[in-house]
Structures are given as structure tokens and as C-alpha cells.
Image (cartoon, helix red, strand yellow):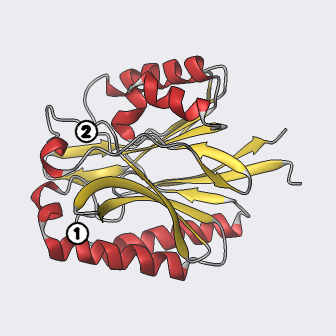
Amino acid sequence: MKENFRLTIAQLNPVLGQFAENCAKAKDAWLFAKKSEADMVALPEMFLTGYQTQDLVLKSAFIKEAEVSIFELAQQCANGPAIGIGHPLSEGGKLYNAYSILENGKIKSSIKKQRLPNYGLFDEKRLFNAGPECGPYSINDVKIGSPICEDAWHPDIAETLLETGAEMLLVPNGSPYSKEKYNTRLNQMVSRVIETGLPLIYLNMVGAQDDQVFDGGSFVLNPGGELAIQLPFFDEHHENIDFGLT
């Protein structure tokens, strides 16, 4: 049995609608993780398409290209660590903001965002359907819960993940910069850790789309809520994180 679980987090800058380029960045991150002998590499919310998509996500050709791209990425990265990546998902006639786990050449599972922000810069209730409650997914026998961005601000979602067996929380984000936003994020995530007793990885994207700036500043919290790792602001960065297994 392995004594640790290695997670690579990739704080990167996707470009809206540049599917090939975003997939190439994801594959480079996967190669970095593979060389590092990681079990999984994680990318931010809606990384495949770039964020925010606004009304582009309502175009069938855009969704089709996203669907083709995610399957091709899974096949190209079959022999190595699992990948967590955000993308739009059309299923059963509904559209979701999803986070999928790619492993062994396939889409292993897809988490659908439950709480859709509809204030300030966000208009997700008009664009997406709310996803159902879900439990954690398993990578090499480690159970990981991934509340997507806004979902992590709601204690009941983290509590459900804990009750269904999650051993850590990996939170993919597309959170724009604003003054004091980092402190707000940190305080909210510390609350989730204290409530659940689980370590938490907050992974944010960097870059800009129109008037929105994504500042990165990803971080990792220990089970007690202490800041264990802080990634830089406004820069792309890969980081390997080791979790001891008991």
C-alpha cells in the first residue's frame, strides 16, 4: 500500500474558446504530474473552455467542441495520473457547470455544480442547471470531494461530502479578483475545514476575460485549518502536494 497520495495542482490561465490551446496546457500539466509520479493533477473550474463563457455556452457548436475535446484529452492522457478538469456538460437535455475526472482514457465521473451564483459578474442561473447532491470520487483508494467554487461556500455541501466518505476537499475555482477577496476566500475555506476536519485544496485560475481578472492565490489548508501551502498571485504555477495515508 502506498504511504502517500500526491496531488499536482495546476494554477493556469485558460483562454476563452481556445479548446486546443487549453487542452495542450492541461496535457502539459498532466506530463508534469506524471514525471512527478503524482496520483492526480487538478485544473480549475471551466478550464477546458475558459471562464466566464457567457452566452457562448448556449451555442450547440461550442458545447459539441467541448465534448469532443474532453474525450480526446482523456484518451491522450490515458497512461498516467488522473485529471480533474472543469468544463460545460450537456446531459439529458440540461446544461451543467461540471468538473470531470479523467482516468484510463475515459471520463470516470462528473460532478455538477449545485449552487449557481447569480450576482455581480455572475449569471449562471440563466446559463446552467443546478446539479444534484453527490458524494466523493475515488483515486487510488483515496476519496476526494470536489465542491465547485460557490458550492464550497455552503456548509451543507461539505457536510454531505464528509458523511459520504470524503477524505479531502479539492475545490476548483474561477474566482475573480476584488479587494479583500483573498481574505474572504480564506476565511470561508477555514470554516469548511473546521466543520469537517478535512484538509482542503483551494485551486483558482489566473488570467483575464474582458473586465474580469483571476488572481490565482491558490492554497492548501491542513485538517486543523492552518495554511500549509500558498501559491503565488497572478502567475501560472504547478505544485505537488503530498498527503500521508493512514
Pick the front one: 148 or 134: 134
Q: Left or right: 18 with respect to 126? A: right
Q: Position of residue 211 (x, y in %)?
A: 13, 46
Which element carries disc 1, helix, strand or loop?
loop
Residue in view at x 60 percent, y 30 percent: 163
Q: Evaluate whether residue 103 shows in this view.
A: yes
Residue 204 is tagged as none
Q: How would you rate the neighbour count of disc 2 (Cα within 10 Å): few for under 14, some for 14-19, many for 20 or more?
A: many
Q: Evaluate whether residue 14 shows in this view.
A: no
- Residue to which mark 1 is pinned: 17
Q: Left or right: 128 with respect to 82? A: left
Q: Position of residue 20 (x, y in %)?
A: 34, 78
For this orientation, the residue located farthest to the front is: 92
- Residue to which mark 2 is pinned: 116
For this orientation, the residue located farthest to the right is: 1
> Which of the 4 image quarters holds residue 221?
top right
Quadrant of the image for the N terminus? bottom right
Asked if residue 144 is positioned above or below residue 197 in the image, the reply reads: below
* N-terminal label among 1 and 2: 1
Which amino acid, mark 2?
Leu
Which amino acid, mark 1?
Gly
Residue in view at x 44 percent, y 69 percent: 25
Asked if residue 102 is positioned above or below residue 6 in the image, the reply reads: below
Q: Position of residue 208 (x, y in %)?
A: 24, 52
Asked if residue 21 is positioned above or below residue 203 in the image, the reply reads: below
